[in-house]
Amino acid sequence: MDKRRLGRTNLQVSIVGFGGTWIAELSTPTAVQVVRNAFNLGINYFDTARLDGDSEEKIGLALQDVREQCVIATKTGSRTKKESLQDFQSSLKRLKTDRLDIIQLHGIDDEKTLKKAMNPSGSLQTCKEAKREGLVDFIGITGHRPMVLAKAVETGEFDTVLVPLNVVTRQALEELLPVAKAYDVGIVVMKPLMVKTSNLITCLYQPSLSLVSDEPDLRFLLGETTDDRVRTALRYVLSQDISVVIPGLRSVSEVETAARVGTDYNGLTLQEQTRFNFNLVDYCRDCGLCMPCPEEINIAAILRFYTLYNNYGLPNWAKKLYSGLEVKVDRCVSCGNCESKCPYELPIINQLKKAHFKMRN
Ligand code: SF4
Ligand code: SF4
């Protein structure tokens, strides 16, 4: 499998990595088999988290004799120095290693949390001390809001950044990648197959609401079979200027499919480039800053679905997603609270009305 440089870490990482969240659901022998299979197929980047059940333990078990050939990235979800130190020591033990490649601040989704983690008694200090002591080589950050992550990158404290990006979730391309490139920060992509709906779905073949689901619109965009859709969606991410994509993997066959994408990847075809070249003007970036709405309208979700309808050519899927929301746009009283908070100055009320008109049946 091809490798790419992970920004200023200078680590060479397989273009497809291993997202370790879902192995927490597997028995230990099965999880070890799945992880080891990934290594055997050329995957050398393994991402896990202190908060992901016993994922660290299983990765540690599977890779203990090949540890030096792997890049292991874990995360601390604690925000204070004291708690994150406990996390860090626990992660080393669980991963059966005396050194981590990357420790990441987990789920930094707003500026207040970023500030807390970065203050003198915050979790970043634990990471920096561990780095000084040679217990970890690099420090990363993870989150779901590219704008917040871009601010973190601009502090110069982080070597890697982990962010969602996929064929219909492109905010990171606009808001984060140029900044990360300027700081030579390694870009790792999560959730390559997931569209944020009511629940977070990240693993490779989770049906229902992910990009892999059997919707006619998605079959048209990404391919007829589930395997086709998985491969196309992963290839789209690989076509961007990123280092590694980490789909959540939970079976040997999922690992084989993902690894094959990495091994066979040779760029997008011209047809695909044309098909994926969407017109993204005045679209909602899904930052959530306009909420909460006093009428309990989920503005970000509705505009996200409207973007699928309007910009990504997925009208029937968008309608289906909208029909699942309990509170619809007709509850809007045009108070204007949301518009005053949108950093992109979107005409939210007007867009919501259009969205409702087009997606209501
Ligand atoms: S204008 Fe409508 S959508 Fe916006 S905050 Fe007011 S009620 Fe909610
Ligand atoms: S409408 Fe504006 S503030 Fe609300 S989620 Fe979209 S981009 Fe963010």
Image (tube, helix red, strand yellow):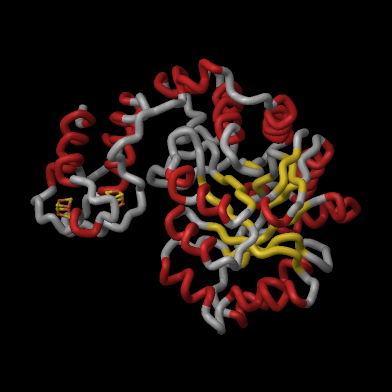
Residue at the (58%, 61%) spot, across then down: 141
Residue shown at the point (32%, 24%) measured from the top left: 316
* The N terminus, quarter of image: top right
Given the current orientation, which residue lies at the most extreme front position?
182
In this rendering, is residue 185 above or below 222? Answer: below
User: Where does residue 94 sit, x and y in percent of width and height?
Assistant: 76, 64
Q: Residue 194: x percent and y percent?
A: 49, 39
Residue that protrudes farthest toward the right in the picture: 65
Residue 30 appearing in the image = no
Q: Is residue 266 left or right of residue 192?
A: right
Residue under the image location 62 percent in, 41 percent down: 247
Q: How many marks?
A: 0
In the depicted structure, whether residue 116 falls above or below residue 284: below
Quadrant of the image occupied by residue 43: top right
Locate residue 192 relative to residue 65 in the image: left or right: left
The residue drawn where x is 43% and y is 26% is 277
- Which of these two is toward me, 312 or 11? 11
Q: Is residue 144 visible?
A: yes
Placement of 64 over or under 44, stated as above or below: below
Q: Quadrant of residue 319?
A: top left
Tell me where residue 133 appears, x and y as whole percent.
78, 77
**Between 21 and 181, which is closer to the camera in this rendering?**
181
> Which residue is at the front of the view, 73 or 3?
3
